[in-house]
Amino acid sequence: LPPFHLEYVWLLILLPRTDFFPGLGWMLTKGLWEELRDKWPPAYWDEFLRTPEVRKNRSCIRPEISRTITFGSSGVSGGQFYNTHLRFIQLNQQHVPFSNLNLSYLFPHVYNPNFHRQVYQDAQPISISSLSNLTPLSANESRAYRVNYRTQADFILAAKYLGVMQDFKYGVPRTAYAGVVSVFFHGNRLFLAPPANWEHYDLSWT
């Protein structure tokens, strides 16, 4: 993550929702464990939890600033993505008492309409070719933009330009929620988003 992330205190407490199960550190509820324990695999638990028959359109809650870090290129995944992405992770350094915060905004009936408004009403549409014109923000500024995509090729082209991971797991891009991937570009919040009437992931996107 770029250094400017840590200038925004609100990012330290932000917990977005995601349809993509993260693999570097996670917790699950007792109820979910009881559902899955009898078929729990000996390895590659993250891939197991991403399969449609296990995920069942459920989503996860992740921190905006990472609470886990990987410190080497060796492991069961053979160092995949380490040099291009994972080694740049900046670990959170400040304690946040989440149990003392009001997290009611995470309930889907609250989160989903707010998220849709932020992406499709508040964010300004922008083309890939215009991204180079964006200027870095100061710590007290806030702007949001939206890059639209319709096809898998559209998504991959935009992801390459932004330097984010371009792969899919059962049609779900990494960190996506309702098809939307949220990143920062020159300090600006940027949504890589499908059409506003998006309904489901395309399993052929692999």
Image (spheres, grey):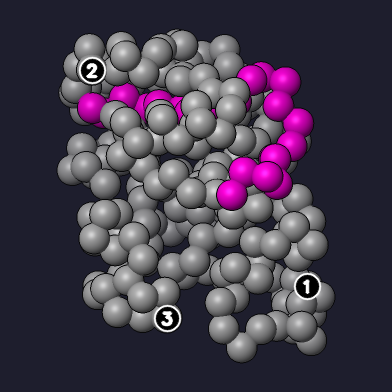
- Foreground of the two, 59 or 197: 197
Residue 104 is left or right of residue 180, and the answer is right
What mark, if any, has residue 155 been given in the picture?
A: none
Q: Secondary structure at mark 1?
A: helix
Rate crowding at label 1 as few (under 14), some (14 to 19) or many (20 or more) other CA atoms within 10 Å.
few
* Label 2 or label 3, whichever comes before in sequence order: 3
Q: Quadrant of residue 56?
A: bottom right
Mark 1 residue type: Gly
Q: How far across and how far down the image is residue 161, in percent?
A: 32, 31
Q: How far across and how far down the image is residue 125, in percent?
A: 46, 11
Residue at horizontal 58 percent and vertical 28 percent from the top = 151
Is 124 placed above or below 151 here?
Answer: above
Residue 2 is left or right of residue 21, and the answer is left
Q: Secondary structure at mark 2?
A: helix
Q: Quadrant of residue 113?
A: top right
Residue occupied by mark 2? 132
Residue occupied by mark 1? 31
State the separation of the CA atoms marked 1 and 2. 47 Å
What mark, if any, has residue 76 been given in the picture?
A: 3
Is 80 placed above or below 133 here?
Answer: below
State the separation of the CA atoms marked 1 and 3. 28 Å
- Whether residue 103 appears in magenta in the rendering, the answer is no
Residue 5 seen in the figure = yes
Query: Which residues are the magenta region?
Result: 186-206
